[in-house]
C-alpha cells in the first residue's frame, strides 16, 4: 500500500502499489475482505449491544431529568400552597401574596414545559433476523456495485457517498 493522494477533507488516500507499478493487483481481495468484515455476525452483535448500552445510558439520564423536574414542580406547588395558606390566615398581605403566588405559578409553568419537552426514554433495540438478512444482502450488493464501479472513469457521486456513510475508515494491516 502506498499514499495515493488526499481527499477534500485532507485525509490520506492509499492504494495498492502493485496497481500503480504494474496494474496487476486485483480489487477482489479488498472487496472480499470488506464484505466478510461487514457481514461478520459477531460484529453486528457487538454493534447492537453497544447501541443498546448507549440507549440505556441515555434512558437513565432522561429518567433522572424527569425525576428532578417532577420534584421541582412538587416543591414549587407546595410553596405556592403555603403562600395561599399564609394569605388566608392573614399572615401576609394581598399584594405580597399575589406577587409571590404569580412568581411561583410562572416557575411551575416553566418546569412543566421543560418536563413536557423531555424526550421519552429510548428503548432497547431488538434486531429482527430479517433485518440482519437484509443488511447482509445490502453488503453483498454494495460489494458487487463497487467491483463494477471501480472500472468506471467517474469515481465520485452517490456510490462513494453511500460507501463512506457505511464505512468510517479502512485499516490496512500487513500480513
Image (cartoon, rainbow, N blue to C red):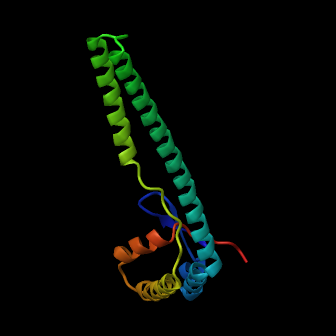
Could you tell me which residue is drawn at 33 percent across and 19 percent down? 100
Residue 105: quarter of image: top left
Q: Which quadrant of the rendered structure holds the C terminus?
A: bottom right
Could you tell me which residue is drawn at 58 percent across and 70 percent down? 47
Q: Which quadrant of the rendered structure holds the N terminus?
A: bottom right
78 or 27, nearer to the observer: 78
Could you tell me which residue is drawn at 49 percent across and 65 percent down? 5
Could you tell me which residue is drawn at 63 percent across and 71 percent down? 46
Q: Vertically, is 17 above or below 141? A: above
Q: Is residue 158 visible?
A: yes
Percent from the top left, x then y, of residue 121?
A: 48, 56
Percent from the top left, x then y, of residue 110?
A: 34, 35
Q: Vertically, is 131 above or below 11? A: below
Residue 90: quarter of image: top left
- Determine the residue located farthest toward the front in the rendered image: 89
Disc count in the image? 0
Residue 51 placement, left or right of 173 = left
Residue 130 placement, left or right of 30 = left
Q: Is residue 24 visible?
A: no
Percent from the top left, x then y, of residue 164?
A: 45, 70
Percent from the top left, x then y, of residue 167?
A: 51, 71
Amino acid at each position: 500500500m502506498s499514499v495515493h493522494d488526499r481527499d477534500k477533507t485532507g485525509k490520506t488516500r492509499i492504494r495498492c502499489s502493485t496497481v500503480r507499478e504494474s496494474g496487476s493487483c486485483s480489487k477482489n481481495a479488498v472487496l472480499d475482505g470488506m464484505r466478510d468484515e461487514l457481514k461478520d455476525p459477531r460484529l453486528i452483535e457487538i454493534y447492537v449491544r453497544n447501541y443498546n448500552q448507549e440507549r440505556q445510558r441515555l434512558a437513565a439520564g432522561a429518567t433522572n431529568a424527569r425525576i428532578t423536574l417532577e420534584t421541582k414542580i412538587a416543591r414549587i406547588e407546595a410553596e405556592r400552597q403555603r403562600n395561599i395558606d399564609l394569605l388566608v390566615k392573614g399572615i401576609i398581605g394581598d399584594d405580597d401574596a399575589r406577587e409571590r403566588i404569580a412568581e411561583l405559578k410562572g416557575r411551575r409553568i416553566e418546569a412543566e414545559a421543560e418536563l413536557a419537552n423531555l424526550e421519552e426514554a429510548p428503548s432497547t433495540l431488538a434486531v429482527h433476523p430479517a433485518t440482519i438478512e437484509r443488511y447482509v444482502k445490502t453488503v453483498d450488493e454494495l460489494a458487487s456495485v463497487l467491483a463494477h464501479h471501480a472500472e468506471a472513469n467517474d469515481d465520485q457521486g452517490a456510490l462513494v457517498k453511500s460507501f463512506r456513510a457505511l464505512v468510517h475508515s479502512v485499516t490496512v494491516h500487513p500480513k
